[in-house]
Image: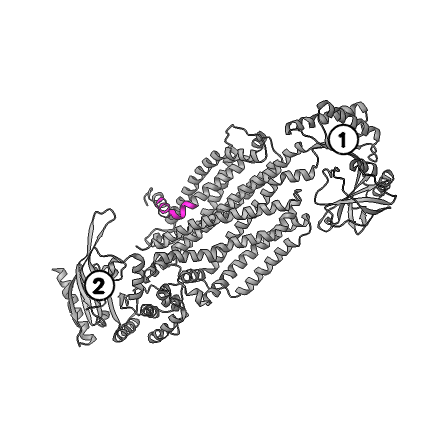
Amino acid sequence: MKKAFVPKLAFEGIRKNRRMYLPYLLTWILMAAMFYIICYLAQPSVLEAIGRGGSTQVLLQFGTYVVALFAVIFLFYTNSFLLRRRKKEFGLYNILGMDKRGISRVYLWETQLIAVVSLILGLLAGIALSKLAELALSKLISGIATFTFTISWRAVLYTAVLFAGIFVLISASGLVQVRRLSPMQLLRSESYGEKAPKANWVLGLLGVAVLVLAYYFSVTIKNPVSALALFFVAVLLVIAATYLIFIAGSVLLCKILQKRKRYYYKKEHFVSVSSMAYRMKRNGAGLASICILLTMVLVMIASTTCLYFGAEDSLRTQYPNDFIVEAIDNDTGVTVLPENVEVYRAALTKLLTDEGVEAKNNSDYYYFGVAGLLHGTTLQAETSFVDTDTYDALTNVYILPVQDYERMSNKQVTVAPGQALVWGKQTQKLPKELTIGPVHFDLIPTEEAAIISSGSMIQGFANLYLVVDDYDTVTQTIQAYYMEKTGEILEQKWRFAFDTDLSSEEQLALYDKLSQTFIDALAQQNADGFGYRCEALEAQREDFYGTYGGFFFLGILLSMVFLIAAVLIIYYKQISEGYEDQSRFDIMQRVGMTKKDIRKSINSQMLTVFFLPIGMAVLHLVFAFPMLRKLLLLFGLLNTKLLILTTGVSVLICAVFYAIVYRITSNAYYSIVSGAKE
Amino acid sequence: MSLLEVKGLKKIYKTRFGGHAVEALKNVNFSVDEGEYVAIMGESGSGKTTLLNILAALDKPTAGTVLLDGKDFSKLKEASVAAFRRDNLGFVFQDFSLLDTFTLEDNIYLPLVLSGNSYEKMHKRLEPIAEQLGIDRLLKKYPYEVSGGEKQRAAVARALITNPRIILADEPTGALDSKATDELLRLFSRINEAGQTILMVTHSAKAASHASRVLFIKDGEVFHQIYRADSSCEKMYQKIVDTLSLLTGGGAE
């Protein structure tokens, strides 16, 4: 065989099948570019330049694994489409006298050509777009925009290694198939229709049962911790159920439609229903894959956009005030001495006056927190381990002195001994009484003092706020009880929280000074054992956006990858069916079918079949909603309305996108089947 | 007036860049009367297939007219040509052209479905035809489940079900064994006796010997024709063979 012959044959093979190869090449390029970009961004040096690291880097690192895994699976899958189509040609070469080695060489050349070209183009595209992606990421996580352009050779290397690996995998599987190739088998066109599986209804019922189970998990989910645990189980169940239902369902649908003679023997439906029935199992599997990818995209977009746009909300839930100062006594840990508090308070007031800052919504109180499991009216001292079962019972009880409550709420109240005023946050029902070890309270529901901030108290758990008269006695009794029960020292705290009218930069500046003021005050006081904690919402914002913006960015990136996959599956489904149907439409045109009839028949297929996956995906999303809501609670996001909004918008965008893609691919299908004749 | 009239038919194929032109049909003239059974014979490359494609309105002539019932259908638009084809022509092809996605029954219904008939009407029409062709038990089967002869009978049923003015058959026995060939030819004769006009293109002398008239095409022109009159199939067969040897002999000169 002449030397240049094999490359030439390979090149011609690609050129002639460009309708199949072009999207494949594009997928390679996009995957390579995507992988390079995410590798590039996940580098600590890049993130440091933006001014972020930590959580964002962990997220992006995770993203690289997902993209890599998906690239392997997906390129392998699309390659199988191509190979199926090329086999016939290879069979012909075989008959014409080319041996298996020759064919293998042609095939290797083809794959090699694709791999090299796409890797180069993909890297170029990736490098070109990496800066844009970096700026987008920097914007989302409100980092610093840098304008230096760098190429990461490490990311280039990773990308090259990954795609070389994929190339080896794909060629190996292709070569095995070429080896098994029997020319007669290849030349004979696949003219057998698929038979309905024997126990079709059993499969269908199983699918429905599994789906109901998955939905049941999601709908009845009680708390975020079990949501986290069950989420992946539910995802796997839904994937299995989707395949079962789509395969069994498409078989059933075809049978029903064919039985309904009025419907079936209409020229718009006749052809499409019969060709659906002809490849019902393959059809079902393809639609299920599309449905699952769409569901993933929807879930990701809906939840990450909600997180991102709800970041401000979560921030506010966790930091109700701009500034929070807390003090504890490290030495005893038991009481906060009023004289020490007085030093702090004075230093704080002085600083605010010096800076000319007006503090608003001040709250200034002593408090004392107990966590435990609330069973009936008894708070059990058990905080060591939170799991699915104990989660719901977990309650934080905060106890405040009545003087502080009166001062902050400007109200005179009387609380008798053995009584406590109470209000709750995230509690289902306020208990009538409460027992904590030796202490027992009759609870009197009262208005929440609006100015009392819940601080960085853990969200998602029930919080009870108790106002008591004999604060010192109560705390000491409970402290002693806990010490004995769990060996845990419960700390009394003093808290001062306030808002300001300052700009973000001024707040950060004040935050720095605040810390310094306390360090100075502490030195003056010479009270080593006294500890303090300062928190500013503005300082936390960075970290919040680093995490939530990172999630959002990753969500968009992965959604793009999955959408590309869904688009390609639709495209290959249409194209390969188009080639199969070509000869059929040829015959039908001879018997008297017009091009208009072909159009109508394609449209009928679109209506009956192609909107099923997106419909099902939306159904999945609706049932995933309770679970998503619970999961987002873990991120301190309580805004259900926002989640509904982002979910709705994602569904809308996906549907429009899907319709456009479907239109384009059905045009490709049309041009294949109608171009066969005339 | 004859049912089908072909006048001065000419077809020139050009290569894509307009360079080399091939004249497939030079000047074809003939007519077919109602109820006739005409066979058109000729060697490969004589222009038979081109002629049939033009008669089937699948291709347009470069010059000349084809009149069916005095109407020139080569001038019709795509959509109306398709309807015309459905309503007036029935096709039987060498490769059967059955769709493997349909049962035989649905294959037979195809032209009627395309013209928008109801199932009840189609079913009523199918019953006698299926019985006549002996395929009434095979209707629920798929093409890949039945033999070649049975497939071709289903194809004939599909051609008949529209009550066409004329049946165009393109090498209908080409892919059949001798037993199935005999059966199909007997079937054609029977249909013809019932009044159906048939135009068959073939290069099998045996197939042509069943026709009432045989036209011979050579180099894009009708070269010769013979009538059956009252002669038997055997005699007709002899006449055809003689003409064919004359035809090829003429070519050797």
Residue A291 placement (x, y as % from top left): 52, 52
Range covered by the magenta-colored residues: A11-23
Image position of A533 (left or right of A25): right
Magenta region includes residue A157: no
- Residue position for label 1: A532
Where the N terminus of chain A falls, by quadrant?
top left
Residue type beneath disc 1: Tyr
- Residue position for label 2: B67
For mark 2, give the secondary structure: strand
Q: Nearer the viewer, residue A54 or B131?
A: B131
Residue at the image position 22 percent from the left and 71 percent from the top: B36
Image position of A74 (left or right of B12): right
Residue at the image position 31 percent from the left and 60 percent from the top: B82
Image position of B47 (left or right of A460): left
Q: Chain of mark 2?
A: B
Residue at the image position 30 percent from the left and 71 percent from the top: B180
Residue at the image position 51 percent from the left and 27 percent from the top: A148
Residue B19 placement (x, y as % from top left): 21, 47
Residue A307 placement (x, y as % from top left): 61, 42
Residue A281 placement (x, y as % from top left): 48, 59
